[in-house]
Amino acid sequence: MDLQDQLKELFPDHEPNHQDEVNDENKLTELDIWLQDKPLHCKFEKRKGKVNTIIEGYNGAKKDFKNLTKLLQKECGVGGSFKNEMIIIQGDFRDKIMQVLNEIGFKTKRVGG
């Protein structure tokens, strides 16, 4: 008898909370951004001696840039910004960013090393 079975016996009225599954669905519905057909270019760049990940090629509205930037910052746990139709994330998070963008439904392309 494992812990799950013991807990079910102790608390038969309790319904398990599937919070992780709900959070993934909510993340996609709250995002409310425009998905484009062309791939986004994800590249690595050093600016003023600091490492940055740059996402280029997105043609969404300013609100979409803001929402997408906020999501990527949260997923990577770092700062970032958007300007001149580029999203700039502090640090080298190309693989993680590409994975998140693919999960949302974007096509991505890794540019450079």
Image (cartoon, grey):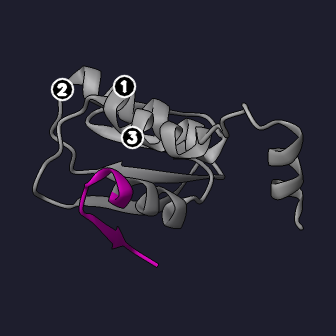
Which one is in front in this view, the residue at disc 1 or the one at disc 3?
1
Q: Position of residue 24 (x, y in %)?
A: 47, 43
Q: Earlier in the sequence, mark 2 or mark 3?
A: 2
What whole-number distance in Å separates the C-alpha atoms at marks 2 and 3? 13 Å
Residue 35 shown left or right of residue 101 in the figure:
left
- Frontmost residue, 37 versus 10: 10
Q: Residue drawn 13% across and 48% down?
A: 36
- Frontmost residue, 46 versus 76: 76
Q: State if disc 3 and disc 2 touch (CB < 8 Å).
A: no
Q: Secondary structure at mark 1?
A: helix
Asked if 40 appears above or below 18 in the picture, the reply is below
- Frontmost residue, 25 versus 84: 25
Which one is in front in this view, the residue at disc 2 or the one at disc 3?
2
Q: Residue drawn 18% across and 44% down?
A: 35
Amino acid type, callout 3: Ile
Amino acid type, callout 2: Ala
In the picture, the disc for residue 32 is none
- Frontmost residue, 23 versus 85: 23
Q: Residue drawn 40% across and 74% down?
A: 112
In the picture, the disc for residue 87 is 3
Q: Which residues are magenta?
A: 102-113
Which residue carries the number 2 mark?
61
Crowdedness near tag 3: few (<14), some (14–19) or many (≥20) residues, C-alpha within 10 Å: many
Which residue carries the number 1 mark?
66
Q: Position of residue 41 (x, y in %)?
A: 29, 60
